[in-house]
Amino acid sequence: MNTHMLSQFHYPFPMLKNPYAVALQEITDNQWIDGEYRWLYQDAPDTRKKYKKTKTAHIASQWFPTASPERLKPLCRLMLWTLYNDDLYEEGTPEGIGYVHTRSVAVLTGEMSAVEAEIPLGDMLASLRQELLQFIPQESIVRFADMISRYFAGLKTELTYKKHKTFPTVAECIALREDSICLYPFLQLTEVETGIVLPPEIHQHPVIRRLQALACHLVTYFNEVQSVGKDEATDSIYYNIVKVIQHEYKISLEEACLEDLRLHNEDLKEFVMLQASLPDFGEWQDAVVNWVHYMGMVLSGWKNISTKLDRYNLMEFPNAAELRKRLNSVQ
C-alpha cells in the first residue's frame, strides 16, 4: 500500500542532486560513522551498517544540490546528527530530553563547550558550529540554534505522548510534527549554500514564515505514509499523523493515508500560490525568490531520495531494544 500511496504525492518543483554526494558519503561512512563517532555503536557493526545504508550525505545532496564540497560538509554532518539524535532519544523520556535540549543549543551558540555540555553528541555539534562559522555569521547560527530548539521541543512532546500512550488530536499532531520533523534548521542553512545572508526582517515576514511551515508540513505528510511501518515497529504511532488520523476518525489505515494525502495537497496548493505571489522584498527580491525555489527542491528531493532508502523500505533501522541499550550506556 505504501508504494502505491507514495506515488500519489507529486511536486511541481525541479529536482537536482549535488555531484559531490558520493564523496561526502565516503566521508560520512569512513571518517564519521566508522571514525569520529564509531564509539557510539562500537560493538554494533550491524547498526553502523544501517546508518550507512540511510545515505545521509545523499539526502543532504538532494536538499543542497548546488553547494560546494566545503559547504556541503557541515550540512552532511547535520544530517547525520539528526539521525543519531532521533534514534538515540526515541527511547528516552520527556524529562531527560530537556537536559540534552538545553546543552545542545548552548554548544551550537558557543555558550558552552562540548566538554562542559557532557552530552553524547556534544563533540559533533561543536564541530558543526565551527564548520558553519566559516560561511555564516553568529547571528545566523543563533537563528539556526533556535530552530534546533524547536525540534527538541517537538521531540519532548512526542515522548510525552509515547510515555502515556495517548494520541494528540490531528491538529495538535501536525503542529508538533512541524517542529519535530527537523526541517526548519535545514531551511535556515540555505545561506550556507547560496552565500547570501538575508536580514532578520525577511526571516520574520509572515509569508516567509508560512512558506517554511508549509514545507515542514509537506515533508511530514509524505514521511508519515512512508514511515508508518517503522513507527508501528518502534511504538511511535502516537505522533505519526496517519495513525493519529486513523485513531481520531476511526477509519482504516488506507483511508487515513488518503486523508493525509488530502491535507498534503491542500498545503501544497497554498505553497505554490504563495510562491507565485511573493511580496516585494526590494533589493532582496531575487535572493528571496531563489530561497523559496530551493525550498521547493527540498520537497521534490526528499521524495526522490527517501523512496530509495532501506531505512523505510526494508525496515533497516535500529530496533527499540538496540536504541534503549545505547541510550542507557551513554547517559
Image (cartoon, grey):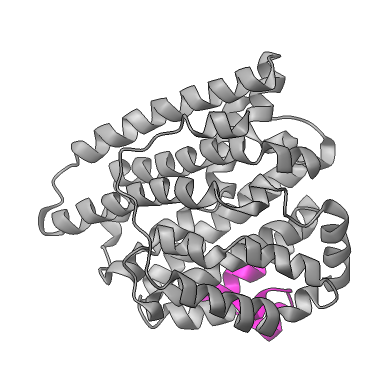
Q: Residue furthest left?
A: 282
Looking at the image, residue 231 sits to the left or right of residue 210; the answer is right
Depth check, front residue: 170 or 36 = 36
Residue 101 visible in rendering: no
Q: Residue at x 31, y 42 (%)?
A: 206
Looking at the image, residue 187 sits to the left or right of residue 44; the answer is left
Residue 174 visible in rendering: yes
Looking at the image, residue 309 sits to the left or right of residue 183; the answer is right
Looking at the image, residue 77 sits to the left or right of residue 141; the answer is right
Q: Residue at x 11, y 59 (%)?
A: 283
Depth check, front residue: 113 or 230 = 230
Q: Main secondary structure of the magenta part?
A: helix
The answer to if 111 sits in the magenta stretch is yes
Taking 318 as reference, is 119 above or below it?
A: below
Depth check, front residue: 162 or 3 = 3
Depth check, front residue: 140 or 259 = 259
* Quarter of the figure that contains the C terminus: bottom right
Residue 306: horizontal and vertical position, in percent? 54, 50
Residue 305: horizontal and vertical position, in percent? 49, 52
Residue 225: horizontal and vertical position, in percent? 60, 34
Which stretch is magenta? 102-124
* Quarter of the figure that contains the N terminus: top right
Taking 85 as reference, is 15 above or below it?
A: above
Q: Residue at x 39, y 81 (%)?
A: 70
Q: How many marks?
A: 0
The answer to if 103 sits in the magenta stretch is yes
Q: Residue at x 31, y 66 (%)?
A: 66
Residue 33: horizontal and vertical position, in percent? 67, 76
